[in-house]
Image: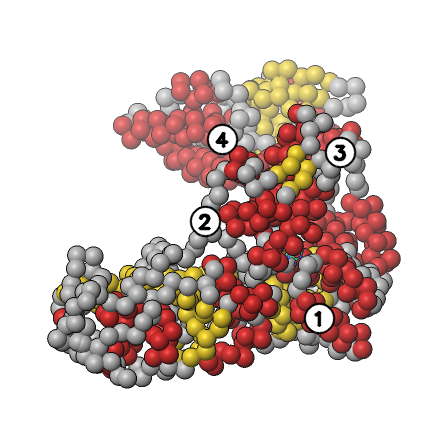
Amino acid sequence: MNTTEMKKTKEDKSMLLPVLALRGLVVFPGMMLQFDVGRKKSILALSKAMEDDQLIFLVTQRDLSDNEPRQEQLYQTGVVARIKQLVRHPEDGVRLFVEGLYRAEMTDEMHDDPFLLAKVTPCKLIAYRKTQRGEALIRYTQNLFEEYLQNYSRIPPDIIVGVVQKKDCGELADYIASNIMFDFEKKQMILEEPSPVKRLNKLVDILKNEIQVLEIENQISEKAKEQIDQNQREYYLREQMKAIAYELGEDDNPQEEADTFRERIAKLCLPELQEKKLLKECDRLAKLPFGSHESSVILGYLETCLDLPWNTLSEESINLDKARKILDREHYGLKKVKERILEVLAVRKLAPEIKGQIICLVGPPGVGKTSIARSIAEALGRKYVRVSLGGVRDESDIVGHRKTYVGSMPGRIIAAMKQAGTRNPLLLLDEIDKLSHDFRGDPASALLEVLDAEQNMAFHDHYIDMPFDLSDVLFITTANDFSAIPEPLADRMDVITLGSYTHEEKFHIATKHLIPKQYKKHGITPKMVRIQPAAVHALIDGYTREAGVRNLERQIASLCRKCAAKLVEDPETRITITQKSLEPLLGPARFKNDDLHKTDEIGLVNGLAWTSVGGEILPIEVAVMEGTGKIELTGSLGDVMKESARTAISCIRTRASSLGIEHDFHTKYDIHIHAPEGAIPKDGPSAGTAMATAITSALCRVPVRHDVAMTGEITLLGRVLPIGGLKEKTMAAYRAGVKTVIIPSDNVPDLAEIDSVVKDSVTFLPVQKVDQVLEAALVRTPETKAGVVHNSTGVLPVPAGQPATTAPSIPQ
Ligand code: ADP
């Protein structure tokens, strides 16, 4: 091509220019750009341009993979650019620095070899005319671009200066398009648009889309970053933990740890099911990162399971002689109880395969139930563990929580087995009558599973979550009140009753067992401290009031502490505790011996009550006042006791004339029945005879013998019905110094149970009718036709020597 040809083309604004095909790059007018050129054809085109006036037509190829694109494989619209700088690289390449000048179209191809030379014509563009719409569009675009910049941090911020300066829609579109990254196809679309406003609108669309994509991209990368941060944090903490563990010499490798557990499991020779389950947990442990929450849960679980005595048994030897010796050595008295226990042991020796009968030791607190159980364990050579059931109201207390719960543990039974360390211990289920239940399930039914010989060979605790064999365990239960044990449980039990102790028994227990035991505990020898018998008697009477000896033991312990303090101060002293020295050491006596009132009183009767902690004297007071026939009952009386009081009144009405009581007393007088101590709730029908006697005494104005106590339910017709707890009640009467106890004749067989000491000092008077009670309890037979005069005390006195005209006759 020669220069003339070139001139000619310039006149019609067309030019013959070498063409440089761009891959994935669109150059806009006004854009300064630096890029590398490597293709041979392109380098030749550049050489041609450098020979002429350094102009070159830059146009984008449609297909990026095309290495030698022909004209038809190029877009038509491109940019005429000036080559500002050209640097040749040693390895054939060229670095080019160009400036885009104006849009142009390739109209004719002159030749394609050795490089592309084409006729290029400037594009016909629409000039921009400033309008409000245009201005608004420019501002909008500028704001949008700012937003784009916020999301895309890799663009230098000074670009914004150029954007703000542009006042022409077309120029702004070109400027932005040349400075941001998006598809070359879209850039080509912007380049080809002749209208400046349309061009900017197209750019706005692209920009909006880009912003959205960037936002999503940022969110994703933010999340990924957070995840990485979290992972890094955990990794860092774990490494730190390892370092700390290493310093402490506790660096455990989960794999090694799992292997150690596997070895321990193998040694245990477990049944297949249990072994499989534990090995599975080991596999899980090996896979978990050291120190993670889950791994510590599994670790705790495996430790607990492996500590259980799956196959460890202690050898049981039933030697009745040895058992008797141990029981006698540890316990004073309790003859019948010991005999019963030896019988049970004898049966076990003869028929060891018969399982399931469970001993239940019933009696008030402190009578030695727990310590008897401990002695049985010793006699049998079994390990002893006590499980306290008092107040257990949640089923999971017995059967545990699933190990997935936070802080979960096995239930009390499995925990006791772990503590025992053998599969055949003696488990003492203490206070089984104190089980309660609520919405969290019924612990009694869970316990049934434990005690049932049919089910307990595969006892299922939720925590260890596999069967455990309890069939070799010897269960002994204790209760204060057998009737409070849930029936299905009570059915399985063999009851052995331990009664209250007499004063003498307490004295012997104290001197033979409690005092030596406490001496030992406090490091005292009999040489250092001597407690005189009179002091022990005073201790029993003045400082304790109980069926058992628990408080007595506490008081002895308290004495020992005081003595120990003195001995430390002066090791040479010898202390003798007399009756008198109790007060300075323990404070004034809390109970007075004279439980009973000393004189015969009108309207005051000694009733007898029985509670789960022993028997007690229950005084009943009655006052009769002029009134309208109201009946007042006070002293926290339960419904049954109130009914019993009404029955007593009606019963007396049926006998009014024979007792010398006015037949209309129930309309003329108010009767007030009271049972001190008012704050303690009382119930039950057994105070019937006592109430009837007190009411009769008050109405007839005849005093009641103060040394008589009574118990018995009465009916309307005056029959006396049997009652429960006779042993404890009579013991209370004996303690209080009562001489005669009136009992229902149906209770006579129970007298066999009563302690001989009690029998020796108390006379029992069995009765069938209330009339016999009155005859025995009132100091004299009520006079018939006695005058009834009300006095201010409310008690009807006998008007001395005044035979009243209204007195009914006594049946002779
Ligand atoms: P319980 O279980 O019936 O409430 P414990 O067995 O706890 O009573 O007895 C309380 C204390 O009294 C224990 O120290 C126990 O050794 C002692 N004890 C009870 N009865 C006797 C007894 N007959 N002989 C010797 N010590 C006894």
105 or 560, nearer to the observer: 560
Which circle marks residue 339 in the picture? 1
Residue 622 placement: quadrant: bottom left
CA distance for labels 1 and 2: 36 Å
Location of residue 669 with respect to 396 vertically, above or below: below
Q: Where is residue 485 in the image (x, y as percent from the top left)?
A: 53, 69
- The CA span between labels 3 and 1 is 59 Å
Q: In the image, what residue type sits under mark 4?
A: Asn
Q: Does the residue labelled 3 lie within 8 Å of ligand 1?
A: no
Mark in the foreground, 4 or 1:
1
Disc 1 or 2, which lies upstream in sequence? 1
Q: Is mark 2 on a helix, strand or loop?
A: loop
Residue 148 visible here: yes
Mark 2 residue type: Lys
- Using the numbered discs, state the Cα–Cα distance from disc 4 to disc 1 in whole angstroms: 93 Å
N-terminal-most mark, 4 or 1 = 4
Q: Give the amino acid at mark 3.
A: Ala
Rendered image: mark on residue 592: 2
Whether residue 418 sits left or right of residue 84 in the image: it is right
Ranked by sequence position, the earlier of labels 2 and 3 is 3
Q: Which mark is residue 151?
A: 4
* Residue drawn at (70%, 64%) of the image: 466
Closer to the camera: disc 4 or disc 2? 2
* Residue corresponding to mark 3: 245
Residue 432 at what x, y percent from top left?
A: 57, 64
Q: How far apart are marks 4 and 2 (CA)?
A: 93 Å
Local secondary structure at mark 4? helix
Whole-percent x, y for residue 618 in the image: 40, 62
Q: Which of 98 and 682 is in front in this view?
A: 682
User: Is residue 640 shown to the viewer in this render?
Assistant: no
